[in-house]
Image: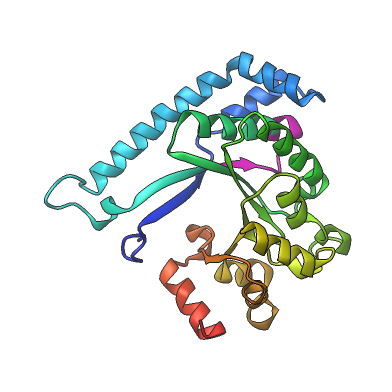
Amino acid sequence: RAAADRLQYVELMHTADGGRAAILGTKIGWEDDFGRFRDKLLAGGMSDIVASVRTETDADEARKGEILQCGTAQADAGCEVTVRYLYQVLRGLPREQVFAQILLGFELTKADPRFVGFNLVMPEDYYVPMHDFDLHMRIIEALHKFYPATHVSLHADELAMGLVPPEGMRFHIRESIERAGAERIGHGVAVMSERDPIRLLAEMAKKRVLVEICLTSNDTILGISGDRHPLPIYMRYGVPVALATDDEGVSRSDMTHEYLRAVETYNL
């Protein structure tokens, strides 16, 4: 499908450890001192999880090559698409599990060049992602100091009025950028509900923080489309944007139709 869309490069979000980091976090137990908690996780088996993820990714990619018949005369066009991974953290889990998964995301980017960063997933309006949002940002901020080269791409403001209290829509993008060091923002639908949104847009433009625009997903999940969507606002203020499908298995979309929708709706 990626090849049919003429894509050259794809980043797949993948909880590649099958939940083993979360289990380790539960086993070790919460620690308020983030540095000490990191040390306990590293000593408690995190390196083994990293090694197993790398081995399983090797096997997965080998299987992909078999299915697509890469390296043969019958090779599928998908063989030419470069695939990289963002380790995805399930942010709706208990805090010790989220911490362990974030740490694994950092460790994977250090150990395996195929993992180019990490992201947080699960609906942003769920109780734990809202209640622990500031904690998650502080965890990323603290761990990033140990892994300064790691890229951070965060979902933020995949929200609409009525899903959460109004005050819950006023800080997610800003904290993701200013505290967690996010270089990309996923969705960013509620940007105009953030505190001082015009200054925030100017900051995003200056720092070149890109927003992944998911038109079909935002319409399907949030009911936000047309004039209510902030894509034209981001473009007006010079914020970098890129069209994205979100989860193709949920949205039943592809990149071609995301571009088509952008052309038909916004005359791009």
164 within the magenta span: no
The quarter of the rendered structure image containing the N terminus is bottom left
Which residue appears at 26% of the width and 46% of the height?
A: 67
- Image side of residue 69 versus residue 162, left or right: left
Which residue appears at 47% of the width and 49% of the height?
A: 12
Residue farthest toward the front in the current orientation of the protein = 206
Please, is residue 218 above or below residue 30 in the view? below
Percent from the top left, x then y, of residue 42?
A: 62, 18
Say which quarter of the image contains residue 41. Answer: top right
Residue farthest toward the left in the current orientation of the protein = 73
- Image side of residue 230 versus residue 18, left or right: right
- Image side of residue 43 versus residue 54, left or right: right
Say which quarter of the image contains residue 238. Answer: bottom right
Say which quarter of the image contains residue 54. Answer: top left
Please, is residue 156 above or below residue 54 in the view? below
Please, is residue 1 above or below residue 64 in the view? below
- Image side of residue 62 versus residue 115, left or right: left
Percent from the top left, x then y, of residue 18?
A: 53, 33
Which residue appears at 75% of the width and 19% of the height?
A: 36
Please say whether residue 160 is visible from this viewpoint: no
Residue range highlighted in magenta? 87-98
Percent from the top left, x then y, of residue 209?
A: 63, 57
